[in-house]
Protein backbone atom coordinates (compact mmCIF):
# COMPACT_ATOMS: atom_id res chain seq x y z
CA UNK A 1 0.00 0.00 0.00
CA UNK A 2 2.76 2.44 0.93
CA UNK A 3 4.74 1.66 -2.23
CA UNK A 4 1.62 2.15 -4.37
CA UNK A 5 0.79 5.46 -2.70
CA UNK A 6 4.40 6.63 -2.96
CA UNK A 7 4.98 5.76 -6.64
CA UNK A 8 1.84 5.52 -8.70
CA UNK A 9 0.07 8.83 -8.04
CA UNK A 10 3.13 10.73 -9.28
CA UNK A 11 4.05 8.34 -12.09
CA UNK A 12 0.64 7.43 -13.52
CA UNK A 13 -1.79 9.78 -11.88
CA UNK A 14 -3.43 6.90 -10.00
CA UNK A 15 -5.34 7.65 -6.83
CA UNK A 16 -4.12 6.63 -3.40
CA UNK A 17 -5.46 3.39 -1.94
CA UNK A 18 -6.30 2.26 1.56
CA UNK A 19 -5.53 -0.92 3.46
CA UNK A 20 -8.60 -2.91 2.24
CA UNK A 21 -7.85 -2.03 -1.37
CA UNK A 22 -4.21 -3.08 -0.91
CA UNK A 23 -5.33 -6.46 0.44
CA UNK A 24 -7.70 -6.81 -2.51
CA UNK A 25 -4.87 -6.10 -4.96
CA UNK A 26 -2.66 -8.63 -3.20
CA UNK A 27 -5.36 -11.30 -3.38
CA UNK A 28 -6.10 -10.51 -7.02
CA UNK A 29 -2.42 -10.71 -7.97
CA UNK A 30 -2.09 -14.11 -6.24
CA UNK A 31 -5.13 -15.40 -8.13
CA UNK A 32 -3.95 -14.09 -11.48
CA UNK A 33 -0.22 -14.76 -11.23
CA UNK A 34 0.02 -17.51 -8.62
CA UNK A 35 2.75 -17.32 -6.08
CA UNK A 36 3.60 -18.50 -2.64
CA UNK A 37 3.82 -22.15 -3.74
CA UNK A 38 0.23 -22.86 -2.82
CA UNK A 39 -1.85 -26.02 -3.04
CA UNK A 40 -2.21 -26.05 -6.81
CA UNK A 41 1.51 -25.84 -7.55
CA UNK A 42 2.24 -28.73 -5.15
CA UNK A 43 -0.50 -30.78 -6.78
CA UNK A 44 0.98 -30.09 -10.22
CA UNK A 45 4.50 -31.01 -9.09
CA UNK A 46 3.25 -34.25 -7.59
CA UNK A 47 1.33 -35.18 -10.74
CA UNK A 48 4.34 -34.40 -12.93
CA UNK A 49 6.61 -36.45 -10.66
CA UNK A 50 4.28 -39.45 -10.80
CA UNK A 51 4.02 -39.13 -14.59
CA UNK A 52 7.82 -39.09 -14.98
CA UNK A 53 8.24 -41.99 -12.56
CA UNK A 54 5.82 -44.15 -14.55
CA UNK A 55 7.55 -43.22 -17.82
CA UNK A 56 10.98 -44.11 -16.44
CA UNK A 57 9.73 -47.42 -15.03
CA UNK A 58 8.36 -48.37 -18.46
CA UNK A 59 11.76 -47.77 -20.13
CA UNK A 60 14.41 -50.37 -20.65
CA UNK A 61 17.81 -49.78 -18.95
CA UNK A 62 19.26 -48.64 -22.30
CA UNK A 63 16.40 -46.18 -22.85
CA UNK A 64 16.84 -44.81 -19.31
CA UNK A 65 20.55 -44.27 -19.87
CA UNK A 66 19.86 -42.54 -23.20
CA UNK A 67 17.24 -40.32 -21.49
CA UNK A 68 19.69 -39.48 -18.68
CA UNK A 69 22.39 -38.53 -21.19
CA UNK A 70 19.99 -36.27 -23.11
CA UNK A 71 18.82 -34.65 -19.87
CA UNK A 72 22.40 -33.98 -18.75
CA UNK A 73 23.30 -32.55 -22.16
CA UNK A 74 20.38 -30.10 -21.95
CA UNK A 75 20.32 -29.29 -18.24
CA UNK A 76 23.65 -30.36 -16.79
CA UNK A 77 24.11 -32.81 -13.96
CA UNK A 78 21.55 -32.42 -11.21
CA UNK A 79 23.29 -34.66 -8.65
CA UNK A 80 26.70 -33.99 -7.19
CA UNK A 81 29.17 -36.81 -7.39
CA UNK A 82 30.41 -37.90 -3.94
Image: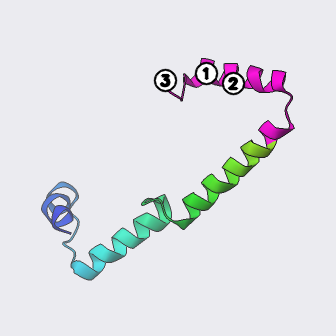
Contact check, label 1 and label 2, Cβ < 8 Å? yes
Image coordinates of residue 4 in percent, x first then y, are 21, 63
Q: Which residues are magenta?
A: 55-81
Residue at label 1? 72
Count neighbours of disc 1 (C-alpha within 10 A) and say few if under 14, some if 14 to 19, many if 20 or more.
Answer: few
Examine the image and state in which quarter residue 70 appears: top right
Q: Check disc 2 and report its element: helix, strand or loop.
A: helix
Q: Which mark is residue 82?
A: 3
Image coordinates of residue 47 in percent, x first then y, are 69, 55
Task: Please say if 19 is above or below 61.
Answer: below
Numbered disc in front, either 2 or 3 = 3
Measure the alpha-carbon separation of dots 1 and 2. 6 Å
Q: Check disc 3 and report its element: helix, strand or loop.
A: loop
Task: Give me the residue at 49% from left, 64% from top.
Answer: 38
In reply to whether residue 64 is colored magenta, the answer given is yes
Measure the alpha-carbon separation of dots 3 and 1. 17 Å
Residue at label 2? 68
Amino acid sequence: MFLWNWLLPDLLGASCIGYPQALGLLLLSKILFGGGGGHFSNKWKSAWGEHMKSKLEAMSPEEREHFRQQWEARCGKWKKEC
